[in-house]
């Protein structure tokens, strides 16, 4: 029981400590690795959510850029000046009038070029008639959009211009002469070309890489210089030859983009030594796919480093507490062993032996109590660390949207940065308060983007009862920023008996009509000393006894002169320098499709204008 026992105890302690160190190294490595993995996944999830929002908004912007030009060839196909040129191409006066009209419309609508092609493919008139790259006299009968429009009535086609050498989308509409003495189908085709330079400039200024591809994966519109007319994947040689033969993309080489898969996730691509999160959204209405590539490497590196540092600190603290407990236990075990040896040597002295045992027992109890307290403290610390781990990783939303949500996005970023600082200072309560504010701001963003998405979506549902106040609120949500910025006094006069009234309509169409009327009222009162807009709702009884609701939008602007009143609902008649003259025409058509009417009230002696939407009340 002497030196041999002491040596055995030392060897046993060394083995225990070696096993202890190995165990905690394995546990620590697993926890640190898992923390980094979770942090990486959280960052990708946050970037993915922000990317989906950005994709949706960019898709709405791209669709709106095309949609706002789609009505132009439809209206121009019925234009009497265009019919006159097609009926008598030799009339130089008619062609000159049409050239100048198309030139003015191009400036007003920001279209790239508008031109008229006869039934032989020859261009008779064009908005660029006075430029060196005039289309007048060129033969475009070989263009697919011309052939399809002549055969089917309408066509849309993206291609490189053979004269201008600028890419764009061509919107074509066949012109039929059904008003002459002898109906003549297929007199010619009216074409509107759209170019996307402004949209590409906006995309180029964004931190993400945004581009759109056709069904074959060829890039058509891109915010990255040099990516246009390159493909996502290598194209078969026969397909490339067919595209070049058709001159759709000029002499573009159609080489594949320099994308390489990044390890760890199929949605991650390596481009120019950067790791990007690739997301896409199909746009079936035009047959394109919109792509968004968000920088992810730096965000992942920071999040993984922070998470691993926090996890490593927690594991180190737990290991230190466990080591203290193990050391204390070994001390107690050694003390108990020495007490036993002492009892064997002092068997003759019963009293001393009993006293030693009592002291050893008391010391053992105290040590066990300390151990229990240490273990309880370790459990509490572990719970605190787990809770802190839940708040350790915060993703960054890196999307830039319209000015209506710039302020909440900036606030979200500020609160997210503060949360990291609070976590580093172990101020979990302050971090939780910041996260609560972030939730409120994202709810606000969801409300705005949801209304914008609903307003931009094409209406296709059957008329149904619609609450008038909800339609008015929806329109005001979209125009509230303009009203406040102009300092307009907005008055909504909705009597209690009509507050819950409903009309038979399509909500999206009704909101679109209201937005047009209220937007016109905002333009009318611009520059007035005390601008004022009033919205009223009134119930009337028609001659057949049916109940109808009237929505009146009034302003205190300059009013409507007699010559303007006579041409209110005729296309291309406008008093605005940058107006197209289609707003009231479209609004009247929308209301008429819902079984209602849109009219202007006779002028009041006090000036201003009042427009009235009259719709049947839902039973």
Image (cartoon, helix red, strand yellow):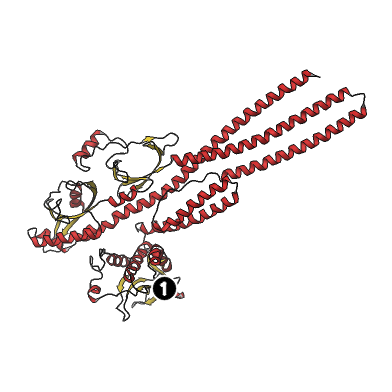
The image shows residue 42, relative to residue 500, as above or below, that is above
Q: In the orientation shown, which residue stands out farthest toward the left?
A: 90
The picture places residue 323, in percent across and down from the top left corner, at 68, 32
Q: Let me know if residue 260 appears in the view.
A: yes
Q: Is mark 1 on a helix, strand or loop?
A: strand
Q: In which quarter of the image is the N terminus?
A: top right
Q: Quadrant of residue 320?
A: top right
Name the residue rendered at 8%, 60% in the picture: 92
Tell me the residue that label 1 is attached to: 491
Q: How crowded is mark 1: few (under 14 residues within 10 Å), some or many (20 or more)?
A: few
* Number of numbered labels in the structure image: 1
The picture places residue 100, in percent across and down from the top left corner, at 16, 61
Q: Quadrant of the C terminus?
A: bottom left
The image shows residue 184, relative to residue 547, as above or below, that is above
The picture places residue 202, in percent across and down from the top left corner, at 33, 51
Q: Let me know if residue 475 appears in the view.
A: no
Q: In the orientation shown, which residue stands out farthest toward the bottom?
A: 605
């Amino acid at each position: 029981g002497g030196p041999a026992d002491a040596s055995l105890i030392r060897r046993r302690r060394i083995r225990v400590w070696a096993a202890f160190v190995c165990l905690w190294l394995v546990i620590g490595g697993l926890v640190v690795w898992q923390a980094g993995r979770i942090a990486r996944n959280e960052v990708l999830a946050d970037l993915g959510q922000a990317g989906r929002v950005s994709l949706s908004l960019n898709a709405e912007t791209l669709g709106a850029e095309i949609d706002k030009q789609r009505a132009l060839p439809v209206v121009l196909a019925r234009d009497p000046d265009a019919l006159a040129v097609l009926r008598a191409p030799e009339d130089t006066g008619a062609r000159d009038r049409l050239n100048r009209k198309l030139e003015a419309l191009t400036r007003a609508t920001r279209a790239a070029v508008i031109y008229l092609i006869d039934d032989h493919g020859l261009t008779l008139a064009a908005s660029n008639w006075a430029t060196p790259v005039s289309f007048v006299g060129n033969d475009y009968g070989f263009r697919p959009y011309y052939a399809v429009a002549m055969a089917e009535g309408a066509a849309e086609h993206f291609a490189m211009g053979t004269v201008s050498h600028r890419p764009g989308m061509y919107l074509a509409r066949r012109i039929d002469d059904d008003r002459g003495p002898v109906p003549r189908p297929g007199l010619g085709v009216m074409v509107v070309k759209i170019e996307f330079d402004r949209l590409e400039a906006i995309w180029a200024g964004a931190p993400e890489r945004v581009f759109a591809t056709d069904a074959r994966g060829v890039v058509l519109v891109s915010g990255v210089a040099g990516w246009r007319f390159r493909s996502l994947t290598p194209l078969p040689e026969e397909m490339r030859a067919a595209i070049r033969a058709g001159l759709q993309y000029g002499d573009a080489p159609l080489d594949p983009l320099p994308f390489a898969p990044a390890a760890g996730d199929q949605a991650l691509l390596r481009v120019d030594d950067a790791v990007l999160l690739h997301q896409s959204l199909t746009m079936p209405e035009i047959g394109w796919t919109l792509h968004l590539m968000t920088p992810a490497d730096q965000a992942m590196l920071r999040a993984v480093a922070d998470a691993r540092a926090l996890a490593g600190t927690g594991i180190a603290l737990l290991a230190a507490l466990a080591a203290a407990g193990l050391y204390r236990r070994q001390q107690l075990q050694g003390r108990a062993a020495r007490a036993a040896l002492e009892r064997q040597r002092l068997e003759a002295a019963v009293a001393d032996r009993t006293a030693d045992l009592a002291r050893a027992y008391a010391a053992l109890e105290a040590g066990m109590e300390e151990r229990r307290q240490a273990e309880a403290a370790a459990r509490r610390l572990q719970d605190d660390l787990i809770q802190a781990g839940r708040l350790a990783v915060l993703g960054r939303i890196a999307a830039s949207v319209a000015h209506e949500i710039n302020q909440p996005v900036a606030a979200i970023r500020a609160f997210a940065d503060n949360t990291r600082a609070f976590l580093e200072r172990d101020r979990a309560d302050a971090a939780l308060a910041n996260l609560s504010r972030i939730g409120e701001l994202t709810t606000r963003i969801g409300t705005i983007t949801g209304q914008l998405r609903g307003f931009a979506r094409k209406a296709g549902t059957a008329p149904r009862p619609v609450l008038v106040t909800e339609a008015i609120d929806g329109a005001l949500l979209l125009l509230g920023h303009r009203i406040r910025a102009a300092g307009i006094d907005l008055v909504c006069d909705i009597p209690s008996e009509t507050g819950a009234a409903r009309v038979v309509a399509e909500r999206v169409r009704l909101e679109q009509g209201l937005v047009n009327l209220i937007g016109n009222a905002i333009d009318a009162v611009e520059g007035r000393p005390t601008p004022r807009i009033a919205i009223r709702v009134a119930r009337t009884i028609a001659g057949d006894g049916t109940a109808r609701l009237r929505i009146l939008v009034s302003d205190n602007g300059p009013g409507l002169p007699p010559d303007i009143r006579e041409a209110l609902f005729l296309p291309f008649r406008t008093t605005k320098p940058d107006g197209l003259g289609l707003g009231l025409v479209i609004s009247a058509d929308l209301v008429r499709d819902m079984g209602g009417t849109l009219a202007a009230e006779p002028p009041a002696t006090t000036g201003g204008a009042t427009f009235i939407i009259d719709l049947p009340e839902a039973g």
